[in-house]
Amino acid sequence: MQRRLLITSILAAPAIACIPARAQTGPLRLIVPAPPGGSTDILARILIERAGAALGQSIVVDNRGGAGGIIGTEAAARAAADGNTTILGHNQTHASNQWMARNLPYNVIESFSPVARLATVHHATVVPANSAARSMAGLIEMGRGGRRVSYASSQAGSASHVIAETFVRRSGMDAVHVPYRGGGPATQDTVAGVVDFYVSTWPGVVSLVREGRLRALSIGAGSRVPGFPDLPTTAEAGVPFMAVDAWFGLFAPRGVEAARVTRLSEAFLAALAQPETAARATQAGLNAAPMGPAEFAAFQVAEVRRWQEMATLTGIMME
């Protein structure tokens, strides 16, 4: 699809109208396009209780992992536009998949109504606890030392894949990519030493780093993160190009009434702003990054453009 047509489609979307929302019955289904245990799932479970209370409606998490988030995202795109189905999408499902997935069965912009951006997270490079690599320089040396190292990703074409592959190429390492069906399985095999390293979202590994089951070598933040004074930033570790944040946001199928989109946005952003919820998010390594529907829509357009450039640069496609 031509980029001009893709971008124009969202700019031409109708403005939110002041119309009454139809009464909602039954629970709100929140599709998480990933297996349990990853960053998307963590964020969903932090928010559902408070958001459900604000809506006066229970929220049921529906984990649908696989295919880089395509399975769950397609289910959301095809769901009835009755306001009772939403999806907690992210930079892959609603930006990079447009360019890195073959025959995508939905359009990242045209198939959805942006509801609210909720959080961003940093990426961290982690190795098994017993790894010989104790720094990014040490990891590079491993990959140049006469043996091929392996790295995990949450899926071919994911941000973890793109960032790690860029690192491998720019550092001249001999490395093989091992794709998984989500962040949870990739993390488990890194803990077990099946792979040598993994570029993960921070929430997906922070508890394991605290417990000493993984060792973090760097994190893509602007400054050292609270609670981890010895963890260098990617800039300090000499790999500043690895500082690429992931983002998470709520979407509804295109066609949901504007008043319902507004109500959903208000409920989830209010949940995010609650001190108890904010503390849990911070503890999990998430950075609150609230945006309402209009601002989030403009942000998504910019992200679609950015990931098109990255797809062209790396040539990575989902397998």
Image (spheres, rainbow, N blue to C red):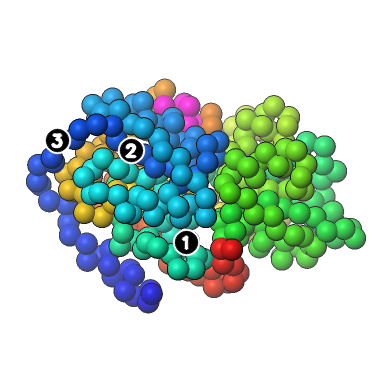
Give the labeled residue for mark 3.
23
Give how far apart the Cα atoms at labels 2 and 1 are.
23 Å
Q: For the view shown, which residue lies furthest in the top direction?
A: 276
The answer to whether residue 278 is magenta is yes
> Would residue 294 be found to the left or right of residue 38 on screen?
left
Give the quadrant of residue 219: top right
Q: Is residue 31 left or right of residue 213?
A: left
Mark 1 or mark 3: which comes first in sequence?
Answer: 3
- Can you give x and y, in whole percent of width and height, for residue 108 in the image? 37, 60
**Residue type marked 2:** Arg
Q: Which residue is mark 2?
A: 29
Q: Which residues are magenta?
A: 277-282
Q: Residues within 10 Å of mark 2 (few under 14, many from 20)?
A: some
Can the viewer see residue 315 in this picture? yes
CA gap, disc 2 and disc 3: 15 Å
Residue underneath mark 1: 97
Residue 276: image x %, image y %?
42, 22
What SS does tag 2 mark? strand
Q: Is residue 269 magenta?
A: no
Name which residue type carries label 1: Asn
Q: Main secondary structure of the magenta part?
A: helix
